[in-house]
Structures are given as C-alpha cells and as structure tokens.
C-alpha cells in the first residue's frame, strides 16, 4: 500500500521535521534522507503496521505543536469538530 504523508510533514515546524525525519530514519534503518523522502511522498510500498506507526509519530509531534501554540492538524490531535454545539 502506498500513502503520501507530504502534506502532514509540511505542516510540522522545521525543528519537528528534523526530529521526525531522524526518528523514522533510525527506526526504519534508512541510511540516506532520500529514502525518507521517498516514503513521505508515497513512492514506497508500506505495511499497515508501518502506516500506523508513522501516524502515531505525527500525533506525537502535532500534540507538541498544539501545546506550544503552533499550527497543528486536529485530526492528529484527536479533537472533535462539533457542529451545532449549542
């Protein structure tokens, strides 16, 4: 299965991008940044377990960004969008 995470990765702050990239490169045993970017762009086949792991790391970094007042994606911080809240 191929899945692109380019949009999510672009929403991370530069510091969090570097930490995220470093963490994935270490855990997947990639030796070049190009391997990481091929994965993020969706150019590699991945298992469901790998996709869930990557999503969990995005949740971690977007929660940090939310807590520090930076931009985050609500779907990665488990916030519910309430329509007709009143």
Image (tube, grey):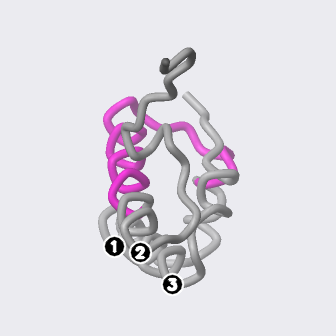
Per the image, the residue denoted by label 2 is 68
Q: Nearer the viewer, mark 3 or mark 2?
A: 2
- Residue at x 60%, y 34% (from the top left corner): 2
Q: CA distance from mark 3 to mark 2?
A: 13 Å
Determine the image quadrant of residue 50. Answer: top left
- Residue at x 44%, y 44% (from the top left corner): 76
What secondary structure is marked by label 2? Answer: loop
| Image quadrant where one finds the N terminus | top right
Q: CA distance from mark 2 to mark 1?
A: 26 Å
Per the image, the residue denoted by label 3 is 15
Compared to residue 69, the image places residue 48 above or below, namely above
Q: Earlier in the sequence, mark 3 or mark 2?
A: 3
Q: Nearer the viewer, mark 2 or mark 1?
A: 2
Q: Earlier in the sequence, mark 3 or mark 1?
A: 3
- Do labels 2 and 1 touch, CB within 8 Å? no
Residue 62 location (% of width, % of height): 44, 59
Compared to residue 46, the image places residue 84 above or below, namely above
Range of the magenta residues? Answer: 40-61
- Do labels 3 and 2 touch, CB within 8 Å? no
Residue 71 location (% of width, % of height): 58, 63
Q: Is residue 5 left or right of residue 58?
A: right
Residue 29 location (% of width, % of height): 36, 68
Determine the image quadrant of residue 49. Answer: top left
Per the image, the residue denoted by label 1 is 26
Q: Nearer the viewer, residue 23 or 45?
A: 23
Determine the image quadrant of residue 67. Answer: bottom left
Is 18 a magenta residue? Answer: no
Compared to residue 18, the image places residue 50 above or below, namely above
- Disc number at residue 50? none
Q: Is residue 73 left or right of residue 67?
A: right
């Amino acid at each position: 299965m191929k899945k692109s995470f380019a949009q999510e990765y672009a929403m991370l702050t530069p510091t969090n991008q570097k930490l995220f990239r470093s963490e994935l490169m270490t855990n997947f045993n990639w030796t070049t940044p190009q391997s990481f970017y091929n994965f993020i762009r969706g150019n590699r086949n991945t298992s469901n377990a790998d996709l869930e792991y990557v999503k969990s790391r995005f949740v971690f970094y977007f929660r940090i960004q939310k807590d520090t007042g930076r931009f985050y994606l609500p779907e990665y911080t488990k916030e519910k969008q309430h329509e007709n809240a009143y």
